[in-house]
Image: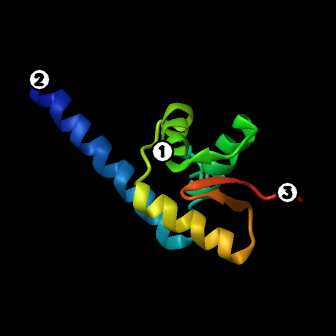
Amino acid sequence: MKPNELFLLYEKEVAEFKLELIRKLSGDADLPGKIRAKRTSNSSMMEVVLKAAGKPLHVTEIIAAVEKEFGVTLDRDSLSSAITKQVRKGKRFVRIAPNTFGLKQT
């Protein structure tokens, strides 16, 4: 890379960083600029997977399906903990068997 190209690349990155910082500090983070992808929560991904399966799944099956569908690797322990908390609150999920969960019927 030529020195001029390297300098221009550096200046461009600095300018983009400054612009993004100004947007964040001024509360205008939603102004046009970089397109932000909305983050999908682990619970929402699990819900999508369970709906698609149409039946209760074991935690290992849920993890595999989420990875295949969303390209995200979930931690088994935190996944079990999150689902268990939702089950206790009576939201979204039900426990069918040890480490096997389904969607709560509404």
Q: Secondary structure at mark 1?
A: helix
Residue 43 spot, x, y in % from top left = 62, 57
What residue is at 52 percent from the left and 50 percent from the top?
59
Three-letter amino acid code of the residue under disc 1? Thr
Q: CA distance from mark 3 to mark 1?
A: 22 Å
Three-letter amino acid code of the residue under disc 2? Lys
For this view, does 62 lie left or right of residue 101?
left
Which image quadrant is residue 99 in? bottom right
> Which of the two labelled residues, at mark 2 and mark 3, occupies the earlier sequence position?
2
* Tag of residue 105: 3
Residue 91 spot, x, y in % from top left = 74, 68
Q: Which residue is mark 1?
A: 60
Which image quadrant is residue 82 in? bottom right
Nearer-the-camera pick, 4 or 56: 56
Q: Name the quarter where the C terminus is drawn.
A: bottom right
What residue is at 17 percent from the left and 37 percent from the top?
7
- The count of marks equals 3
